[in-house]
Image: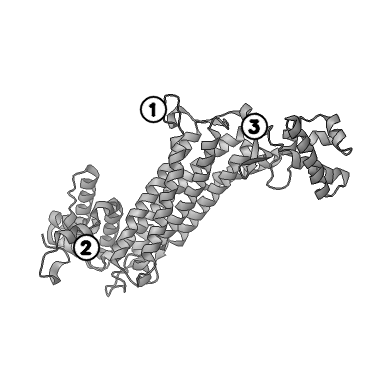
Amino acid sequence: MEKLWGGRFSQNSSKLLEEFNASINFDRLLYKQDILGSKIHSEMLYNIGILSSEEKNHIISGLNKIYQEIEDGDFNFKISDEDIHMAVEKRLVQLIGEVGKKLHTARSRNDQVALDLRLYVLEANKEIRGQLLALIQTLLEIATNHKNTLMPGMTHLQHAQPISFAFHLLAYCFMYKRDFERIVSDSDRNNFCPLGSAAFSGTSYKIDREFCAKELGFKSPSLNAMDSVSDRDFGLDLLYSISLIMMHTSRFAEELILWSSSEFNFISISDSFSTGSSIMPNKKNPDVAELLRGKTGRAYGNLISLLTTMKALPLAYNKDMQEDKEVIFDSTINVSLSLKVLNAMLKEIIVNKDSMLQKAKTGHISATDLADFLVQEKNISFRDAHHIVGKIVAYAESKGIDISEVGLEELNLQNKHITKEAKKVLDLHNAMNRKTSFGGTAISNIEFQIKYLKDWLNEHK
């Protein structure tokens, strides 16, 4: 069958060209957006007198039938149709005849694909927001139950200072909160309708772009037709935001992997989200967390891929931009699945409180609190206090015990300033609760952060 654009050509397309040029194998995912855009476009064409009422109704009826065929798996996608736009238009003409050819009046595939992909991105943005809120909710529920569950906080992956498990999880809540706010900003910045930009310079038809923008749920029409069809910033914004979500998720996944190991034994991941070994019957592997970590590389690659595609394109539309869709589809599908599986896995983890507490008793993690006590209560400079406590740590090391387990008399022998009050600050719970500065580890701060996040969640549900 002749191409819909084939009037200027005297030879048929090479089969090799068709295979290389076509995007139908992946952009068919945009069928909902494409059909919706076409229905609104036909309504607008009727409003301005291009279509009669009967013609408009025929077109919309035909588009509804095509939508149902695709939904039911009855639509025959052909590589010769090139893309979803041509496939839908060709089928429309088959269904309703010549009137179907009027649908493309006052638009181009350039603004059509810009519309479809922008709608897809905005819908994906909304879905990801919901998944982030659900994940934060789950983290808050766990944190609420573990405000007093002591664990070693780390720097350089070495035991550093005592914190609670809740405090650690709240750090991820705030990461995901920033992710949520970032993609909200993406949505607001890109909520403009490109339909009506035509090829790149607008159209001579007296179209109503405001109508199309409103009916399609956009804030307003885009202002510059050339920018509208050549812009893919909206896709890059989403890919960047997804990359940050996946980076945060990968960091969390790395900790879940460590925490579930025999060496840490901080948590147990349920059998529902673990796998076994094909050769070692004793193994229980945290494959979900490992895949979350691994998929982050794909998200980064997709971002770099589209950035590279766009970096040297002259205005306006270029065929290179066909490469935008697969990376956007891949990242949105994978971030959605990643957030869902992480949320589900977290709901079933078992927190091993006793193991966390035992591990907190290694590494002398209340040493800094003793140094701070000497500064605050004994008027000793921090550098001198640091030196005094360092010697006590060395003494504890020689005895094979943690600094929190050194007796008061032994402490006093090491330095006369170490009194009964000083001994109290070495208690791990006391040390944790001494961090009363805003944002610190004290229970009062943790409770404030939990309340703050719960209130924030309620505002955004």
The residue that disc 2 covers is 103
Structural distance between the alpha carbons of marks 3 and 1: 31 Å
Q: Residues within 10 Å of mark 2 (few under 14, many from 20)?
A: many
Q: Residue at x 41, y 60 (%)?
A: 234
396 with respect to 208 (left or right): right
Q: Which residue appears at 81% of the width and 34% of the height? A: 423
How far is the residue under mark 2 from the one under mark 1?
A: 61 Å
Q: Position of residue 86 (x, y in %)?
A: 21, 59
Q: In the orientation shown, which residue stands out farthest toward the front?
A: 398
Front residue of 81 and 266: 266
Give above or below for 219 relative to 369.
below
| Residue type marked 3 | Lys
For the N terminus, give its image quadrant: bottom left
Q: Which residue is mark 1?
A: 279
Q: Amino acid at mark 1?
A: Ile
Q: What color scheme is it?
A: one colour
Estimate the x, y position of residue 332 in percent, counting from the top left: 39, 49
Identify the mark at residue 62; answer none if there is no mark: none
Is 99 above or below relative to 376?
below
Q: Residue at x 19, y 53 (%)?
A: 62
